[in-house]
Amino acid sequence: MNQEEEQISLSPATPALDTVPVGHEEDSFRYAGWRIILAAFLGVGVSFAPMVPFTFSLFVVPLQSAFGWNREAISDAFAIAALTVAAVSPALGSLLDRVPPRRVILPSILVFAGAMASLSLLRGHIAQYYLSYLLLGIIGNGTAQLAYSRAVLTWFRKRRGLALAIVLSGSGTGSIILPLIAQHVISAHGWRSAYLALGAVALLGFPLTALFVRNRPVRTATPVLSEPVVAVGPALRTRAFWIISIAVMLSAFSMNAIIAHLAAILVGRGIAASSAALALSALGISAIIARLFTGHLLDRLPAPFVALAVLLIAASGAAILAFAATPWLGIFGAILMGAGSGSEADVIPYMIAEYFGRKRFATLYPLSWTAYAIGGALGPILMGHGFDRAGTYVPLSVVLFSIPCFVAAFMQLLLPDRSGPPALTPLAELSSDSVNSSAY
């Protein structure tokens, strides 16, 4: 066991972990794992996940006005961040399987906040803009649900779906609040001040993460639930992994394309910028509600059926946004898209943990992020390219971006039954993972 490991103190009213049936301690509000959930909720809420995608479109028009960059060039920054996330996430996940998450998250928060604030110093050189987003991509997932989920999974089994849903609802909460903050500061003080404000907000997750986020300590007397344990190589050869990854890539292509341009699409239809920001916030509100409901469903229903439903909802929202010409229709489309896209974010880590076990979660989950980033990078670029060629967001062209999401939805029907993926053998989880169970 790591010599630096701290023991997590439990309330006297909380039964000792090694005397409670597996999973039953999770029903108590005094269970130490819920403190990790609180810290992770706040940390994810001000992380890369909500901050970069959900505020990006608010800066498109101001940057074009300030520097004369075309929208495809501006969208390239989003692609750079997304592709960098794709390239870095597997190595980051491997690191999280070897060192305690807090040692990754805390420095990542500091660098991420500095990178966001550095965008306030842009001076018209687009290379400077791209370099800032490159740094955001390198460090971004160290602040987001990837890093926090690794710690959360060590604390929860019975309530795993709900626990992940609450953590990921932090991203939804951030996607409500951050666009409103950014738009208010842009309107009142300009886009430079808005980037500076976002950098300051990114630091809010630091204190609780430092206090609470850590893996569950190993207790050899604690009974463990049987779940799949598989090496990374065999996992990469399973049908389940490739269906999950390809579906993630297709849905990210659709959703990121529209989310990254959402405000600009609505403003281009004559909708006020304040209403466009409200649509982004409505997207976030629906994501929170849907995530919590989805987490409840995941603890009770087969995950592929839940994924099918939420992706169909997201695709329908994307199709509606393609033709939205009034504020209320834009908000309605954003609500559907938020409900679907937010819920899908719950389903992916849940399915990876269920099919492959949590001992390889931090290595395999980033690979799904790689697929997400590839699709998520291409979508906004092609949407921006279409605008530059046509001079407007053509509704028929925009609705085409919803088709990959529909395809991703029906791919869920191809997933094997959880009880018997041929490459995975259910094994009792090993209890000697001393580094991963460090309190740090």
Image (cartoon, rainbow, N blue to C red):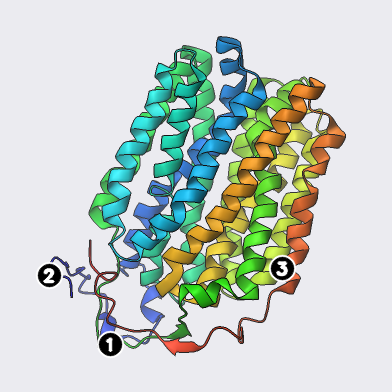
Question: Considering only order in the chain, which callout, 2 or 3, is on the residue closer to the N terminus?
Answer: 2
Question: Considering only order in the chain, which callout, 2 or 1, is on the residue closer to the N terminus?
Answer: 2
Judged from this view, the residue extending furthest toward the left is 3
**Does residue 151 sit above or below 226 in this rendering?**
above
**Left-right relation of 140 to 425:** left
Q: Quick one: SS at disc 1?
A: helix
**Does residue 136 sit above or below 337 in this rendering?**
above
Provide residue 349's location: percent of width, then percent of height: 52, 64
**Left-right relation of 121 to 300:** left
Graded by Cα atoms within 10 Å as few (under 14), some (14 to 19) or many (20 or more), the crowding at tag 3 reads many
Q: Nearer the viewer, residue 368 or 143?
A: 368
Amino acid type at circle 3 is Gln
Provide residue 380's location: percent of width, then percent of height: 66, 36
- Quadrant of image for the N terminus: bottom left
Amino acid type at circle 1 is Thr
**Residue at x 56%, y 23% (from the top left corner):** 59
- Quadrant of image for the C terminus: bottom left
Q: Which residue is mark 3?
A: 412
Q: Are marks 1 and 3 in contact (CB under 8 Å)?
A: no
**Residue at x 66%, y 28% (from the top left corner):** 263
**Left-right relation of 407 to 239:** right
Say whether residue 428 is visible: yes
Say whether residue 302 is visible: no
Q: Which residue is mark 1?
A: 19
